Image (cartoon, rainbow, N blue to C red):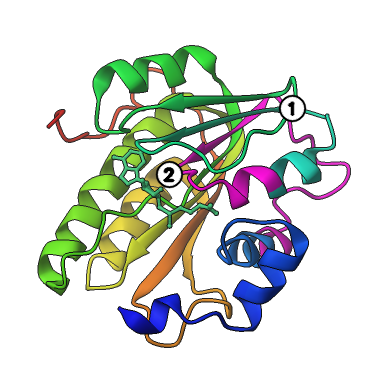
Amino acid sequence: MAGYEKPDFWSIKARKEGYPARSVYKLEEIVAKFGLLKKGSSPGPGILDIGAAPGSWSLWLLKALGGRGRLIAVDIQDLGISPADANFSFLKGSILDEAVRAQLRAAGPYSLVVSDAAPSTTGSRLVDQSRSEELVEAVMGLAVEVLGPGGALVMKIFQGGEEKRLISELKKSFARARGFKPEVCRAESFETYLVAMGFKSQPGVRKMTVPSSP
Ligand SMILES: C[S@@+](CC[C@H](N)C(=O)[O-])C[C@H]1O[C@@H](n2cnc3c(N)ncnc32)[C@H](O)[C@@H]1O
């Protein structure tokens, strides 16, 4: 994993611009490509940032929102940032924990759910992939419960054969869904993102299977 610690162009840019992680430019690319925060398209009622630590995506989203909406961030780890912004709140906990999901539901609905959540890697691609899928299923399950009509979802997944099934699953609840790998992703990384837009709110049939709490 030594290669991951070597600062590259994006890490240096992130440091200069005050972001704790280079991953901010992945979100920037995704938002621009899919027009997720286009001027004129309402960012409210809120955005949910899952797996938010150390906090680059949250910082960037707060700037992009410019006070036009709320941002709720959740992570099992503390954030490395503490923005003094009345529109921002952070919840420390696991997305796999039903009590945490209940609090996030209560703070919704959201127009955008973003998830960069990833398990700590073990070195075994199979194990990492299956943990990532567990997280993704939990994120999908929560997203369909908390998104408002027309809402969008962005989530990270480790590549490994499940993308097609997950995209088909997403297409049941969203008008459009596809995979997208930002150019900022490191060449050796096997992460990619799924982007779903145009949430079709169907009260009563929105629940997906969510893994039980560990
Ligand atoms: C790649 S980092 C996110 C980076 C972040 N987007 C940023 O720009 O600063 C992945 C995060 O997912 C979090 N994570 C992993 N499992 C989680 C879970 N079950 N619930 C919430 N967060 C989780 C990790 O703690 C880690 O902080």
Mark 2 element type: loop
Report x, y in % for residue 130. Answer: 15, 58
The quarter of the image holding the N terminus is: bottom left
Side (left or right) of 93 relative to 29: left
Distance, label 2 to label 1, CA atoms, is 20 Å
Binning the other alpha carbons within 10 Å of mark 2 as few (below 14), some (14 to 19) or many (20 upward) gives: many
Splitting the image into 4 quarters, where does residue 208 fall? top left
Splitting the image into 4 quarters, where does residue 207 fall? top left
Report x, y in % for residue 30. Answer: 63, 63
18 in the magenta segment: no
Which residue: 58% across, 80% down?
Answer: 183
Label 1 sits on residue: 84
Which residue: 37% across, 70% down?
Answer: 191
The amino acid sitting under disc 1 is: Ala
Mark 1 element type: loop
Q: Which residues are magenta?
A: 31-59
Given residues 120 and 116, the one toward you in this image is: 120
The amino acid sitting under disc 2 is: Gly
Binning the other alpha carbons within 10 Å of mark 1 as few (below 14), some (14 to 19) or many (20 upward) gives: few
Splitting the image into 4 quarters, where does residue 8 fall? bottom right
Label 2 sits on residue: 51
Q: Sequence-wise, which precedes: disc 2 or disc 1? A: 2
